[in-house]
Amino acid sequence: MPLYQAGILAPLPPVGRYVFFSLAGRDADAIRTALQRLQPLVDGNNAVVGMGPQLAAALDSPLPFLREFPSLQGPRFQAPCTPTALCLWLRGTDRGELLALTRRLALALQPAFALQHSVDAFVHRCGDNGLGRDLTGYEDGSENPTGDAATLAALGRAQGDGLDGGSCWALQQWEHDFTAFQAMPSQAQDHAIGRRLSDNEELEDAPASAHVKRTAQESFEPEAFVMRRSMPWWSASPQGADRAGLMFSAFGCSFDAFEAQMRRMLGMDDGISDALFGFSRPLSGCYLWCPPMRDGRLDLRRLGIGR
């Protein structure tokens, strides 16, 4: 059995659901009891479990690498911080099954946790390489590491029992302005992303603001590799205008690689903002720790649960 939550490195599921919980109180015993009920209900594949700093603090078990998502402000744009105590990334093939799973897990977590909101997601135009496309039509995750490099980028190691196999999860909900995007000429769209829509080839003559150039993982010092596991989302608006975008999901051996990329996207070092902000904006941002697995169950020893 793997020592990590398998969904982190597995191919994207056809449908997904991100379910966010807050703490309903600060009773550490009630929180531990709820998490003990959760352990046998998830296998790290049907549901990837992420825990926020406030949850670790409530259990008096702070982790040295786990911190809140920073409120980052660039010259023109910002990345908001929206902390959460616990998030479940539910993964499957049937949306109805995920709804039933949401109810079952939420019930197990009561009364210590309160369900705040959920975001339904899906794979769009998945190719033979297992990568889906953003709703703009561009492939997402083209630069993901593979094989052993993926494991090194996404999972903690040499940290000790109860930590090795864990992952630092950066999660943001981005909302796209499709009217603004579709008003751009096709070449401007390609230059904003840094790739050609037609064949996904990287453009050498793309401007410095191109998303691919802003986030080229090998261009950082040290290199900033993460495993992207993002999924498009969509929701209906009562006013009749649908809202949609991308649940950006990145798993790393620390939060440093993601944070370096986000700072450069915002132009915090050189004043050049990522062209992505021309038609999309982040609505949320949180950091979570995905515990490792032990004997097919979540290994929660570092939170004082189990031995």
Image: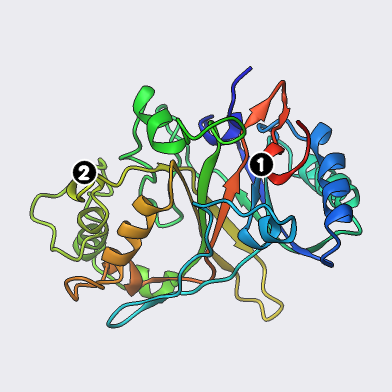
Tell me where residue 162 appears, x and y as whole percent: 62, 34
Q: Residue at x 27, y 68 (%)?
A: 275
Mark 2 closeness class: few <14, some 14–19, many ≥20 residues within 10 Å: few
Could you tell me the amino acid type at mark 2?
Glu
Instruction: State the image quarter where residue 258 is shown.
Output: bottom left
Count of marks placed on residues = 2
Residue 28: image location, x then y, percent:
83, 57
In the picture as drawn, the residue positioned furthest to the top comes out as: 1
At mark 1, the secondary structure is helix
Residue 195 location, x and y as percent? Answer: 23, 50
Of residue 31 and residue 152, the one placed in the foreground of this image is: 31
Q: Is residue 66 left or right of residue 192?
A: right
Q: Is residue 271 above or below residue 42?
A: below
Q: Is residue 266 visible?
A: yes
Residue that sits furthest to the left in the current view: 205
The foreground one among 125 and 305 is: 305
Residue of label 1: 302
Q: How is the image coloured?
A: rainbow
Q: Residue at x 43, y 29 (%)?
A: 151
Q: Is residue 175 left or right of residue 29?
A: left
Which residue lies under the disc numbered 2?
Answer: 218
Percent coordinates x, y for residue 260 in the rendering: 31, 58
